[in-house]
């Protein structure tokens, strides 16, 4: 095999050690063993390291060992004997130790991917000597940088760099102003969870070909620089989970290619810019968990291609207009935990084709639940809890999660709920619902996981609705007017962890038979009419 030039064994199920004999294939230019389960051979007492012989093949141009179980450290003499190496892919292994300074000998490298490993130590500034580098991936390691210098500055020598990813490393420090001197071709800048502090440098606006900028999960503070408007090619901007503040600048509205804007979990205040409604390319808008305090601009409801809208956990006020139904492409809408008032738009059912998740919880909404919601055939999760909604529960679509707790709902439970055979979470507590628990709830016992009717006015017996195959984990029927015995069909709920029937009118003996429920941890029977001997029957 000494004359073989190209070996591609990727995406198989090879196991064991990678033989050192591969170094004897002197004509080899490309070796791909990605996505196997190989572990490297012991060499020079370095248990589990990649065979050094791999880097002795002078003709080698491409080496891909992605997604194996390789251990150990990189050899200290990288590219001394393989100066033609152009592409090195070692991601998704367990390689540890430092990135050797000899990496600078790999002067022909265009792609260096070391992500998702266990590398530690400083990111070498020698990377700046790789003048042909186009892609550098160092993310998801344990790499750091010296306090007195920044590897980012050294990378300004790499004029062909288009993709730079070093997120999920504890780098500390600040993003240097020299970041604005990186390659004018740079399109991907991924620096999430790096423990960066300080402000976003204004020089970031120099990177005019940037398409994705991710600085999320750091400790950045201050305002967004107005130079952000210079990134005309930007499609994705993620600044979430920082300490950024001030108002959201109108400069963001100049990003007419923007598809995804994620600014949640910061300290932004003031109004949502009306001009965001002019960014017709927006598909994903995340502004949740800030201190925004305006009404929702009417222009946002005109973003007809918007897929995700998250404005939750702010101080937004005003009402939800009929124009909300214009978001026909949306699959996720969350405006929970604000100060919205008024009624739910009666035509909200027009969002029937695509909407999967809708949360209007923790607001000040009033009036009835619109009947049109019954036509929202794609809806899976509906949360209207903690409002002032009144009236009865209308027919609803085939949901998995229905949360209507802490409102002023009244009347009996509609039998249509029994048709929701995929319903896993039903939370109706703290309302004024009445009547009996329908027998047809047995249709739900193989789908329901959480069942909460506490603090209502339900009466009559607890029906024997818990069928064989019941997967319920939590049942709360407390604070009602339920009577009779505990149904022994509860014995079918082998996953039950909590049962609360306190504050009712149940008359029964202590349910020793519940010892057959192996997961039961919480049992509340207080304030009922249980009687009899508490001793375990012989």
Image (spheres, grey):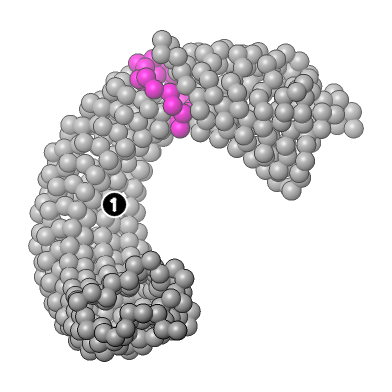
The foreground one among 234 and 242 is 242
What residue appears at the point 66 percent right and 25 percent down from the top-left corner?
73
Quadrant in the rendering for residue 46: top right
User: Picture coordinates of residue 282 (x, y %)?
Assistant: 32, 46
The quadrant of the picture occupied by the C terminus is bottom left
Asked whether residue 379 appears in the rendered view, the answer is: no
User: Would residue 448 appear left or right of 56 to someone viewing this image?
Assistant: left
User: Picture coordinates of residue 196 (x, y %)?
Assistant: 36, 25
User: Picture coordinates of residue 172 (x, y %)?
Assistant: 39, 22
User: Would residue 295 appear left or right of 37 to someone viewing this image?
Assistant: left
Asked whether residue 410 appears in the rendered view, the answer is: yes
Q: Which residue is mark 1?
A: 309
Give the extent of the magenta segment: 163-186
The foreground one among 410 and 316 is 410
Q: Is residue 170 above or below residue 442?
A: above
Magenta region, mostly helix, strand or loop?
A: loop
User: Picture coordinates of residue 480 (x, y %)?
Assistant: 19, 79
What residue appears at the point 57 percent right and 30 percent down from the top-left corner?
118
Q: Is residue 217 above or below residue 528?
A: above
What residue appears at the point 56 percent right and 12 percent down from the top-left corner?
126
Q: Is residue 64 above or below residue 178?
A: below
The quadrant of the picture occupied by the N terminus is top right
What residue appears at the point 38 percent right and 38 percent down from the top-left corner?
235
Residue 37 in the magenta stretch? The answer is no
């Amino acid at each position: 095999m000494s004359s073989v030039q190209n070996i591609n064994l990727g995406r198989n199920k090879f196991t064991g050690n990678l033989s050192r004999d591969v170094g004897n294939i002197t004509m080899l230019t490309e070796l791909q063993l990605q996505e196997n389960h190989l572990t490297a051979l012991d060499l020079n007492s370095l248990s589990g390291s990649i065979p050094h012989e791999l880097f002795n093949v002078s003709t080698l141009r491409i080496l891909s060992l992605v997604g194996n179980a390789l251990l150990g450290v990189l050899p200290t003499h990288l590219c001394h004997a393989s100066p033609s190496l152009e592409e090195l892919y070692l991601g998704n292994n367990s390689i540890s130790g430092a990135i050797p300074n000899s990496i600078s000998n790999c002067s022909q490298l265009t792609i260096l991917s070391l992500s998702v490993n266990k590398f530690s130590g400083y990111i070498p500034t020698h990377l700046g000597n790789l003048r042909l580098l186009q892609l550098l991936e160092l993310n998801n390691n344990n790499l750091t940088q010296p306090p007195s210098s920044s590897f980012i500055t050294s990378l300004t020598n790499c004029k062909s760099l288009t993709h730079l990813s070093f997120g999920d490393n504890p780098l500390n420090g600040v993003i240097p102003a020299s970041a604005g001197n990186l390659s004018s071709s740079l399109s991907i800048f991924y620096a999430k969870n790096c423990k960066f502090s300080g402000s976003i440098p204004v020089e970031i606006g120099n990177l005019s070909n940037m398409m994705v900028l991710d600085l999320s999960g750091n400790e950045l503070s201050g305002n967004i620089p107005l130079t952000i408007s210079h990134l005309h090619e930007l499609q994705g901007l993620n600044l979430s989970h920082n300490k950024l503040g001030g108002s959201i600048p109108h400069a963001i509205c100049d990003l007419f290619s923007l598809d995804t804007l994620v600014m949640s979990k910061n300290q932004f205040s003031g109004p949502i810019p009306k001009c965001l409604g002019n960014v017709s390319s927006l598909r994903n808008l995340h502004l949740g968990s800030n201190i925004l305090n305006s009404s929702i601009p009417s222009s946002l409801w005109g973003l007809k291609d918007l897929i995700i809208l998250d404005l939750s956990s702010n101080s937004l006020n005003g009402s939800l207009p009929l124009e909300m139904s214009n978001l026909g492409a949306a699959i996720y809408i969350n405006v929970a935990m604000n100060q919205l008032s008024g009624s739910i738009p009666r035509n909200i059912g027009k969002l029937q084709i695509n909407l999967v998740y809708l949360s209007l919880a923790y607001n000040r909404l009033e009036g009835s639940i619109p009947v049109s919601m019954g036509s929202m055939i794609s809806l899976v999760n509906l949360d209207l809890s903690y409002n002032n909604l009144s009236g009865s529960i209308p027919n609803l679509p085939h949901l998995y999660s229905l949360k209507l707790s802490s409102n002023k709902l009244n009347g009996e439970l509609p039998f249509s709920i029994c048709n929701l055979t995929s319903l896993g979470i039903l939370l109706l507590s703290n309302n004024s619902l009445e009547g009996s628990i329908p027998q047809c709830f047995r249709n739900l016992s193989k789908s329901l996981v959480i069942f909460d009717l506490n603090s209502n006015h339900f009466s009559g017996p607890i029906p024997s609705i818990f069928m064989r195959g019941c997967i319920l984990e939590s049942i709360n029927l407390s604070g009602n007017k339920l009577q009779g015995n505990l149904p022994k069909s509860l014995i079918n709920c082998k996953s039950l962890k909590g049962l609360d029937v306190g504050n009712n009118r149940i008359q029964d003996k202590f349910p020793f038979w519940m010892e057959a429920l192996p997961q039961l941890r919480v049992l509340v029977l207080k304030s009922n009419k249980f009687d009899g001997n508490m001793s375990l029957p012989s």
